[in-house]
Image (cartoon, rainbow, N blue to C red):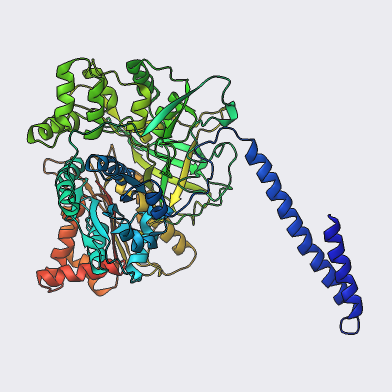
Amino acid sequence: MSDNSQDIIKEAAAAAAVTGSLFSTFDVIMLVLLLGAAVWWLYSSRKGNKKDEILLSKYSIQPAGSIQITENSFIKKLQSSGRSLVVFYGSQTGTGEEFAGRLAKEGIRYKMKGMVADPEECDMEELMKLQDIPNSLAVFCMATYGEGDPTDNAMEFYEWLKNGEPDLTGLNYAVFGLGNKTYEHYNAVAIYLDKRLEELGATRVFELGLGDDDANIEDDFITWKDKFWPAVCEKFNIENTGEEELIRQFHLVTHKTDEVAPNQIFTGEIARLHSLQVQKPPYDAKNPFLAEIKVNKELHKGGGRSCLHVELDITDSKMRYEAGDHVAIYPINSSELVERLGELTGANLDEIFSLINTDQESSKKHPFPCPTSYRTALSHYLEITALPRTHILRELAEYCSDEEDKKKLLLMATNSQEGKALYQTFIVDACRNIVHILEDLKSCKPPIDHICELLPRLQPRYYSISSSPKLHPETVHITAVVVEYKTPTGRTNKGVATTWLAKHKPEAGKPLPRVPVFIRKSQFRLPLQTQTPIVMVGPGTGLAPFRGFLQERAHARVNGKDVGPNILYFGCRHRDQDYIYQEELEEYERNGDVKLNVAFSRDQAQKVYVTHLLEKNMDELWDIIGNRNGHFYICGDAKNMAVDVRNIVLKAVQEKGGRTESEAVQFLKKLESMKKYSADVWS
């Protein structure tokens, strides 16, 4: 302890002695001890801070994943770098961020230097000051997620706009939304944002753009931006500088063997170096938990397809889940595809490199954790199986030695009808990824580092949890169909996560395979009262969350609670092939825990689906949702099944509930707002 600390305690003791008439001996002792503890804490924290400073000063190479203190004033960044365009993004899967980057990059062609900004990392109240920068413009690329919700990184900004009344007079803005028409709340966030900004006094520079991921969101985006830029030019009286200039956003640094210590090289960590070796809670998207795969078994009994039941051990993770939540898995790309990409580019996949942002003001210093090897980047950080968007094709064209190959790529990168049609057939319909493109356009030889810059970041795959913590508090169960299909080019494409899972099954005498995971909370919840009746519609793997629901309700019954009716509609192709969890479901039925309605679509000449069974039981359906305050749940395909089911519910409300069409729609909307009609669907 320092001399100063000892002096403070002595003074405190002396003061206590003087006031002895006011305090007992015990009080004096306690006072001295408390003061001593306070001084010790202050001294220790200062000492700890000094240690941290010494440690930090030793690092010569700063890993991308390390925590950095960054200035959150986007206004200062714009002013210091002479920019006037800021593009904010709300992104859950990376597409919104990608579109924002493309817009900011294109701004150079229109004499508007731009920067990309994450609203979560910015002081968004500064929007009120943006008008102080001449000819300034804010663009928002905002995705809608879940049931009309903003993405995680845009939530705080969304709530600020919704609940506050900032004066945004003088703010110039434009909005492009990313959504999916198969979902009920199509582009709800972008639509609200566009309207709300205008209400708060901001000036709309160009009309709201809506991208539909169920159709061709790339086409929607380039069509919108090709009209957006002329509107910007007219607004600010500026001109297109001419032909686009292809500028690399990141510059390559190749590290020599002895330049970077092995323990400073990223080997698959999502953000923090060594986070998978030294695990520290709390666990989330940037810090996943490395869960052991305790069980990994096949559920199908035949038919040529595969469906996995996987149990992940979350013991000691302090992660908690509820029935209806999602678990996210960080997959690893196929080693065969990675090797093939290395061959096609002539790369040394074990070479250590870093990609460093040429924009000094950007908060995103690297596209993924660096330094790392090309093998790690292609395996853990990049979507090598994704269908490349048009801006990637535009850049690949520069590496073609054959003019026909170059013309083909350049045409697909245009907004012409011919270009769009070729992109649809050559890329989308043929399901060509970057490997396939390089195989088929043999003169295209891009450097591996540019491919690493261009490809989007590998995203976690989300699965509805198929268990209840009431029965399985230490494990999370997944039910997933292994994705594998033939393409028109004769190739076999495979799903990244399910293919990896299928190859990693526990083996006797060997360490259990492990996979990085985290829990994502959901609004898909059982009623608080166990006696509330529920109807569940979940064909195929749509059964997953309802398995958890049934486990929970059966547990409640066993523990003496009054449990309401549980009605399940499940469908598959054949009873003897893909009737997953058949024994469990039939056991629940024998125990009175569920009323089963099962459709086997191909066991008879006339196909029968869950929608046919539901339509036959509209009296029961209306009784539960109209008379008994019940809840209705649907999980599975958003594009067809969910739409058909919704229409049957509307039909039941009209025919059995005596409502008009408009009244039925309002009734269903009310159920949704009260969380009595819930959907967990995907397209």
Q: Position of residue 296 (x, y in %)?
A: 44, 36
Q: Which residue is situated farthest in the left direction here?
A: 417
Quadrant occupied by the N terminus: bottom right
Quarter where residue 481 is shown: top left
The reply, left or right, for residue 582 in relation to residue 370 is left
Which residue lies most toward the bottom here?
A: 21
- The tally of labels here is 0
* Residue 120 horizontal/vertical position (percent): 41, 54
Judge by depth and name the residue closer to the eye, 188 or 599.
Answer: 188
Residue visible at 40% across and 29% down in the picture: 251
* Coordinates of residue 667 in the picture (x, y in percent): 20, 71
Q: Nearer the viewer, residue 649 or 391?
A: 391
Q: Is residue 605 left or right of residue 171?
A: left
Q: Would you place residue 668 above or below residue 399 in this image?
A: below
Residue placed at 19% from the left, 15% from the top? 402
**For this view, does 355 lie left or right of residue 256?**
left
Residue 56 visible in the shown view: yes
Where does the image place residue 541, in percent across and percent down from the top left?
31, 45
Determine if residue 616 is in view: no
Look at 73% across and 50% down and name the residue there.
47
**Vertical placement of residue 488 versus 478, above or below:** above
